[in-house]
Amino acid sequence: MSDRHSAISHFLAATPETLGLFYGFLGVLSFSLTLPATRVAVVDLNPTFVGLGRGVIAGILAAIALYITRQPLPSRRQWRSLAIVALGVVLGFPLLSAWAMQQLPAAHGAVVLGLLPLATAIAGVLRAGDRPSLGFWLASAVGSVTVVGFGVWSGGGHLEAAHLILLASVVAAAMGYAEGGRLARALGGWQVISWALVLAAPLELIPTAIAIARHGLVASPTAWIGFAYVCCISQFVGFFAWYHGLAIGGVARVGQMQLLQPFLTILASAVLLGETITPMTLGAASLVIASVALGRRAAVRSVSP
């Protein structure tokens, strides 16, 4: 019992950066099944319905949470930031990635999404006031090149036109992450994603309804499970930990935890689906973990954005 209390006390006494990395890891862990779940969902369901309908469902959950906890309305300035968050992670990334996943295997997504941590760091410089050191950029570049190289290797060494759509989704997500991480310092992590979902929901209703009218909702149980995951976890609950981590640990530094996402996806596939983990996967994952550790030690200054 004393060892448990000691571990809890040590965790509570950790630096904000360490806590930020911990919460960031929880967020990345929850996001690690997003592309496979989307891929499963769009086999039977229209990608517009999957990409935007997930925001409608999550928006309903967010509205209920905000109402029950009686959260005050954001200020006018905060609404502008919430609009950027909504465009990035509620509208842009889900819709674009759903379109791309209709044409690409989930494993190919790692090719382009491997650039997301680097893009998030750049967005953190532009929007959140982060000023990473040269050592941080070098560690981030090594990790990103490793993930992209692994994705190209695992995908057979070729890229497709759909990767450009996925690249656009990376830009959208990076801006949404950076703006949300900055705003979460004042508004709170779960409040940021909740208000962004509520703000975007009216824009998603009409195209979602049109997609339902044109393509229907006949799908296998597996497709519905994938859709339920992206609605509840990928689009809502996962952001609680993610934005809290970005707020207390810094957008650029915590954003590097995304480098682990492809390998967490592969690990989950091995556990849940019995897929084999190759020595190349283990080697690439080890190099990525090393780059995250080096980035953790590198200096990142923060100035007023």
Image (cartoon, rainbow, N blue to C red):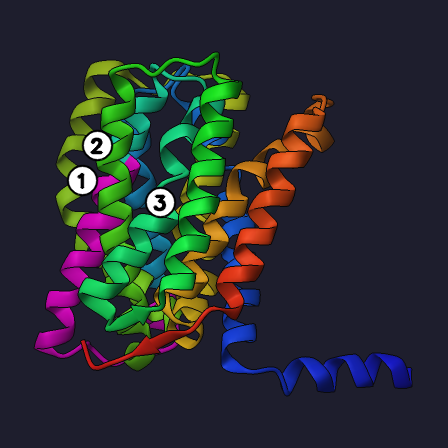
| Residue beneath disc 2 | 208
Left or right of 105 in this view: 177? left
| Label 2 neighbour load within 10 Å: few <14, some 14-19, many 20+ | many
Instruction: Point out residue 155 in the picture as x, y percentages from the top left corner.
Output: 47, 17
Question: Are discs 3 and 1 less than 8 Å apart at CB?
Answer: no
Kind of residue indicated by mark 2: Thr
Kind of residue indicated by mark 1: Leu
Q: Which residues are magenta?
A: 65-94
Q: Say if residue 66 shows up in the picture.
A: yes
Q: Secondary structure at mark 1?
A: helix
Question: Are discs 2 and 1 less than 8 Å apart at CB?
Answer: yes
Q: Main secondary structure of the magenta part?
A: helix
Q: Say if residue 228 shows up in the picture.
A: no
Mark 3–mark 1 Cα distance, whole angstroms, equals 28 Å
Q: Nearer the viewer, mark 3 or mark 1?
A: 3
Q: Is residue 74 above or below residue 175?
A: below
| Residue beneath disc 3 | 116
Q: Secondary structure at mark 2?
A: helix
Left or right of 80 in this view: 94? right
| Residue beneath disc 1 | 205
Q: Nearer the viewer, residue 105 or 46?
A: 105
Q: Nearer the viewer, residue 83 or 108?
A: 108
Q: Kindly identify which numbered label has been placed on residue 22.
A: none
Mark 2–mark 1 Cα distance, whole angstroms, equals 5 Å
Magenta-span inclusion, residue 75: yes
Quarter of the rendering containing residue 116: top left
